Amino acid sequence: MGRVTATTPDLWHAYGRSRVGTDREVPESFCWIWGQDCGPGPEVLGPLSGAYVADLGAGAARHAAHLAVRRPVAWVDASPAQTAMAADLFGLVPRLRIVGADVVAHLQAARGSYDVLYSVFGAVDFTDPRQLLPAAWGALSPGGRLVFSTLAHFLSGDVAEADVVSRQIAAKTQDGEAAWMPRWVLQEQVWVKLLDEAGFADIGVEEWPAGEGPRAAATLLVSARRPA
C-alpha cells in the first residue's frame, strides 16, 4: 500500500479480493475503526466543500469512492494489484482519480496540492512515518488536515511499540511463498511526537474500543493540521 519497488514483490495481490465478485457498489458509509461497523464517519475530515482530498494507501478504493460521489478524490497506492482492482471496481466514478504510485514519492512531488489527506489502516501503517509524515506535511496546503486511523495494539494483542520501530508481519507472494512486510503499530505519544517533529499542529488522538471477534482491535483515530 505504501511502498512497492521493482525488486519488492507485491504482497497486496489478495487483499480485498474476496469481495470483488459480490460487492461492487460504491459504499453508502465511511467508517474509520478496524471493525468497519460503527464509529465516526467522514465528518472527521472537516469541511470538504472545494477541498482536494487524497486517500493514502487506499486499497480497493471503497472509502475513496464513497467520498468521490460528491467531490474530487485522489486514490494513491503503490500496489499494482490494488491499482488494478480499484480501477476495475470504481474506475468509472467520475471524481475519483486513481494514482498508482509510491505514496511518499507522490506526496513529495505534490507540494501544497492537497487540502485533506487521510489513511484508513493504509499507507500510514505500512510506510516509515519518519518519511511519510514530513511528505504529507509538504503536500498539504497551509491549514490542510491529515487524518488517519491505525491499530492501537497489534492484532495478536501485544501492546503497541513505545519507539518508532516496525514489526514484520506475515504475508504471501502471488506464488504462495512466505514473505514479510513491516507494519508500524505505535503508541499514542509516539504518533504525537512524530507529527510534532514533522511540523503539524492541533494534534488530536481518540481511541475507539475493539468490537467482537477473534481479530478485533482497538483503533487510534489521529488528526493534525499543517499550520496556516
Image (cartoon, rainbow, N blue to C red):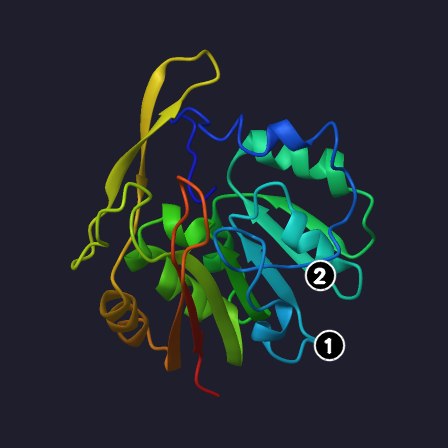
* Residue in view at x 53 percent, y 26 percent: 13
Q: Nearer the viewer, residue 185 or 164?
A: 185
Upstream in the sequence, badge 1 or badge 2? 1
Q: Is residue 136 left or right of residue 28?
A: left
Tell me the number on the disc at residue 183.
none
Q: Position of residue 48 (x, y in %)?
A: 68, 75
* Residue in view at x 58 percent, y 29 percent: 81
Task: Point out the residue furthest to the left here.
Answer: 163
Q: Position of residue 79 (x, y in %)?
A: 52, 35
Kind of element beneath mark 1: loop
Q: Nearer the viewer, residue 165 or 79?
A: 165
Distance of label 1 from label 2 (alpha carbons): 13 Å
Q: Position of residue 202 (x, y in %)?
A: 40, 84
Task: Point out the residue furthest to the front here.
Answer: 212
* Residue in view at x 40 percent, y 56 percent: 150
Tell me the number on the disc at residue 67.
2
Q: Nearer the viewer, residue 5 or 223?
A: 223
Dot 1 alpha-carbon crowd within 10 angstroms: few under 14, some 14 to 19, many 20 or more: few
Q: Which residue is mark 1?
A: 50
